[in-house]
Image (spheres, rainbow, N blue to C red):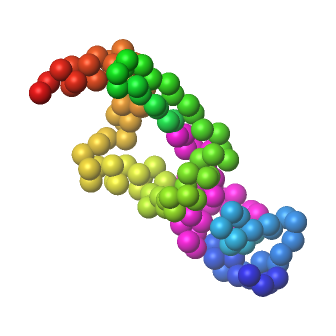
């Protein structure tokens, strides 16, 4: 990128300064423009759609021992979440809750049900795993 770029949010020139640093993908915007973008619920770069703000995302890894049916869960920190997004080149097609609601509706999930699905009691999950392992 050159020292003088165009902010794709307001379409005005943006200079390379400490107050206008590039976001993770290298694209540069005015600080006020990118903050307003985030306040509107957008978490991806307006140009390339790579995630630059993971504050609204949580990734939890669960490792289950199929013999003992015991599991351990690990919640990733922000840097680890960025690493997962970068490693798998994950781009989120939903920039805000309305987009996410529409995306989930396409696969038959209601956004209001997500918390319940994500916060299921471990006993329910364990019981389900046990009953599935008994079914032929």
Quadrant holding the C terminus: top left
Q: Please state, as top left, top right, bottom left or bottom right, where the N terminus lies in the image.
A: bottom right
Percent across and percent down for residue 19 are 85, 64
User: Of 111 and 136, which appears nearest the observer?
Assistant: 136
Q: Position of residue 83 (x, y in %)?
A: 61, 52
Residue under the point 87% across and 71% down: 17
Q: Is residue 129 left or right of residue 69?
A: left
Residue at 51% x, 35% y is: 60
Decide if residue 42 is on the left or right side of residue 65.
right
Q: Residue furthest left?
A: 136
Q: Position of residue 121 (x, y in %)?
A: 39, 18
User: Which residue is nearer to you in this view: 76 or 23?
Assistant: 76
Looking at the image, the residue that sits furthest to the front is: 67
Give the camera-side residue of 21 and 36. Answer: 21
At horizontal 67% and vertical 47% (from top left) the residue drawn is 79
**Number of on-image labels:** 0
Residue 70: image quadrant is top left
Prevailing secondary structure class for the magenta stretch in the rendered image: loop
Judge from the rendering whether residue 43 lies leftward or rightward of residue 131; answer left or right. right
The range drawn in magenta is 31-59
Q: Which quadrant holds residue 36?
A: bottom right
Say above or below: 41 vs 59.
below
User: Is residue 115 inside the magenta stretch?
Assistant: no
Q: Residue at x 74, y 62 (%)?
A: 32
x then y, percent, for residue 96: 49, 54
Q: Is residue 27 above or below residue 131?
A: below
Whether residue 126 is visible: yes
Residue 40 seen in render: no
């Amino acid at each position: 990128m050159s020292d003088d770029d165009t902010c794709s949010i307001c379409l005005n020139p943006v200079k390379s300064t400490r107050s206008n640093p590039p976001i993770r993908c290298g694209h540069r915007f005015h600080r006020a423009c990118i903050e307003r973008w985030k306040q509107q619920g957008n978490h991806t770069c307006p140009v390339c759609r790579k995630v630059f703000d993971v504050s609204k995302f949580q990734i939890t890894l669960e490792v289950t021992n199929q013999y003992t049916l015991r599991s351990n869960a690990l919640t990733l920190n922000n840097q680890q979440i960025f690493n997962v997004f970068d490693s798998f080149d994950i781009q989120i097609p939903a920039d805000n809750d309305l987009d996410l609601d529409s995306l989930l509706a396409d696969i038959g999930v209601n956004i209001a049900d997500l918390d319940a699905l994500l916060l299921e009691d471990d006993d329910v999950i364990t019981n389900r795993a046990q009953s599935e392992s008994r079914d032929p």
